[in-house]
Image (spheres, rainbow, N blue to C red):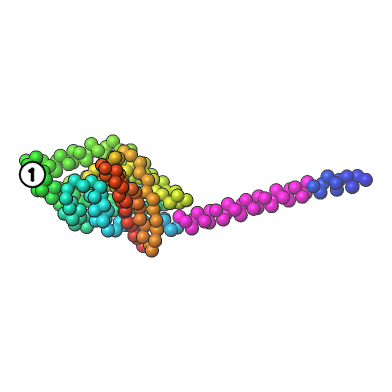
Amino acid sequence: MNIKRIRKYFTPVVLSFACVLSGCSSNVTSDNQNNTVKKEKNSTLEGKWKVKDFQDTIKQLSQVRARIVDEDKRIKNFYNDFDMTLTITNDNAVLHYTFDVTKLYEYYFNNFEKGIYEDLEQYTNKKRTSFNVNYNVLEYTKAIRDGDKIDYTLKNGEIDEDKKTITFPETPSIDSEYLLGNPTYNDETNPVTYSYSVENNELTLTVTAKDVKGKEYPINIKFTKEN
């Protein structure tokens, strides 16, 4: 009689315990699968990406600003040596570039600023002062100058692989002249979210900008993965 009672109560306990173990095993398997999928996703993005065809990005930004006729045709060659990289580790992104603005300053001074400033040196000094004022207030951006060469880093980019977006806490810019976001309504202190796509080893960041009339323009920044 006692044995029957023991079996009566012991059997359900064993079965319940087995179910718990089975459930735990299932959860562990599920977690492992999720981690594997995440690693596979990250492996597509992770690494260092180097900018390409940045002149096309400048052309798109010029269309939004519409300040100078054919501006993109006049200055695009100044960006041939523009060296920008996007480094992705796990869900974090860092944007970095170096750029010598000497030729760009010479062009703007000779064509638009000659009657305002006494000489190129005065104009350049004004640009350097503006540079310090604009970038010193930023929290996540570090921009330093060595003469006319700029070394720029923007950290804390967050990647959402489900939404396929990369969000930076501040908007990247080129010497505060070109804002890689919405140049009409934003400045460097605003966050910016890019949608991204990866195809044939090419990463494209896209953000929509609006001109003063509300017309929308897609701004694309293209990268290729470095080996």
Q: Is residue 183 visible?
A: no
Report the magenta residues as a range.
13-42
Judge whether residue 43 is colored magenta.
Answer: no
Per the image, label 1 sits on a secondary structure element best described as loop
Residue 48 at x, y percent in the picture: 36, 56
Q: Residues within 10 Å of mark 1 (few under 14, many from 20)?
A: few
Judge whether residue 26 is colored magenta.
Answer: yes
Towards the viewer: 212 or 140: 212
Q: Residue furthest right?
A: 1
Residue 99 at x, y percent in the picture: 23, 51
Looking at the rendering, in which quadrant would you find the N terminus?
top right
Question: Residue sitting at 79 percent across and 47 percent down?
Answer: 12
User: Dominant secondary structure of the magenta stretch?
Assistant: helix
Residue carrying label 1? 114
Quarter holding residue 130: top left
Residue 176 at x, y percent in the picture: 24, 43
Quarter holding residue 140: top left
Residue 215 at x, y percent in the picture: 29, 46
Towards the viewer: 24 or 68: 68
Disc 1 residue type (three-letter): Lys
